[in-house]
Amino acid sequence: MKKEEVPQDKSNLASANMRELCYAVDKDGNYTTALSTGWEPKTVALDNSIAAIEEWIEEARRRISAGEASPILYFMELNKMDLQVLAGYTGLWAWRVKRHLKPAVFKRLNEKILARYARAFNISVEELKNYKPE
Amino acid sequence: MVVEFKHHQSAHCENGVASNLLRHNGLNLSEPMIFGLGSGIFFVYIPFLKVNHAPAISYRPQPGIIFSRVARRLGIRIKRKKFSDPGDAQKALEENLAGGIPTGLQVGVFHLPYFPDQYRFHFNAHNLVVFGKEKGKYLVSDPVMECTTSLSPEELEKVRYAKGALAPRGQMYFPIHIPENIDLKKAIVKAIKSACSTMLAPVPIVGVKGERLVARKIRKWPEKVGVKTTNHYLAQIVRMQEEIGTGGGGFRYIYAAFLQEAADILEKPELKGLSQEMTAIGDEWRDFALNASRILKNRKAEDGMYQALADQLDGLADREEAFFRKLKKAV
């Protein structure tokens, strides 16, 4: 990549006033660095991943409405977590977290366990317990 | 307490922290030199490890190993500590700062407040340097940022105790011994040889073989997992290759910059030619990302587009195989 070809496309980096460093060659063929505001193909890929996450969140809401999953699933997807990550933040085994995704099991959870989830999601226990998909 | 610390922005966090910490201790090594000395060029495909519901693909080796290799090859000693108790972790950091030691930390990205929202994923192998505390806030040199920034003690604890894969567990590290005389030439030769062996390794998921395996997968994915999931996987590949921290082209440009530096130090002009070749390979990786993004944008992607993308990846594997064979002979 030549220095003048370092892409300066619009991207989400701008929202945080960030530019990233790229390596490129100057006119004499020597390596140098240049700042880039973004590159369209990268934005396309990131947007694709974000869209996937939004779909998982939607799917979680649908399953909670249908009585197939507990509110934990929604907040897990909302926080871009998977079972392992959530297990880490709650200090529970992943298989227990998986069980807690069942509405029947979730209803019987005590305050202490609920508090762990609430802290992991940075919300109150009430918000977690009373979550209803619109 | 503030330690005089010079912040240099870098493409990749681990190289950047290593380079900045060593520069602070009087050893002037550029980011590409750190990357090269750590044999940072890599490719791996781990189908059974899922990241964001997609198979893991990485263009660089496991976190922490680049700096460890640099240290081993140059005779530098690094102190690494992990803490089960966050209070202890903070105390140890404060002690270091009081002693005037800028300290490298492994952190998770998800809770980093200065990162744009969309870039915050549960990726736990980010690195930064804390070099002081002012008005109750820690002064932070995050190498992917243009300028230094700061974090409150609560924010810092949160990122040091991020959970999930590669959880940092409060890890901090800093060089404690740098030898007076460093044999850079020997270390460079060793590092290049090791990089060549890894890229040409007879392991199906690593190096050029890993690239060919992914090419075969791209051919099959549309039929096996459907177009939508395939596109999700491709997006993940592009992101691993090009997103912040790679310097572009899946780290290939940084490696080319290293070879250019190495050519002068080793007095081997043929490495300059190889650096140019690596740049061209990096350009081809960028083109690969561009073609993948075209598939993502095209809602009616045809099977032929996936086959063409797989062909391009196969071509890249061939080029890299030939390249690393030549590079091995050159040193």
Image: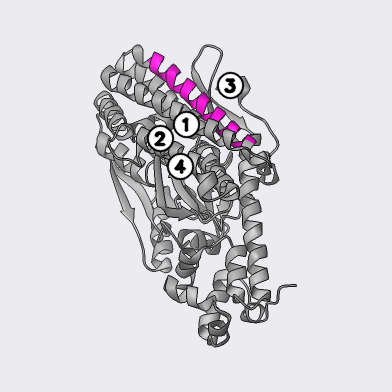
- Residue B198 position in % (x across, y down): 30, 35
Residue under disc 2 on the same chain as residue under disc 3? no
Using the image, name the chain to which the residue with label 3 belongs: A
Q: Nearer the viewer, mark 4 or mark 1?
A: 4
In-front residue for pair B213/B181: B213
Residue A92 visible in the displayed image:
no
Residue under disc 1 on the same chain as residue under disc 2? yes
Magenta span contains residue B216:
no
Q: How crowded is mark 4: few (under 14 residues within 10 Å), some or many (20 or more)?
A: some
Using the image, name the chain to which the residue with label 4 belongs: B
Q: Mark 3 points at which residue?
A: A3
* Labelled disc at residue B313: 1
* Labelled disc at residue B212: 2
Callout 3 amino acid: Lys
In-front residue for pair B90/B34: B34
Magenta span contains residue B288:
yes
Q: Are marks 3 and 4 in contact (CB under 8 Å)?
A: no
Q: Label 2's element?
A: helix
Residue under disc 2 on the same chain as residue under disc 4? yes
- Which of the 4 quarters of the picture holds residue B166? bottom left
Q: Distance between the residues labelled 2 and 4?
A: 9 Å
Callout 2 amino acid: Arg
Q: Label 3's element?
A: helix
Residue under disc 4 on the same chain as residue under disc 1? yes
Callout 4 amino acid: Lys
In-front residue for pair B128/B279: B279
Q: Name the residue under label 4.
A: B217
Q: Do the residues labelled 1 and 2 touch (CB within 8 Å)?
A: yes
Q: Distance between the residues labelled 1 and 3?
A: 25 Å
Q: Which of marks 2 and 4 is nearer the N terminus?
A: 2
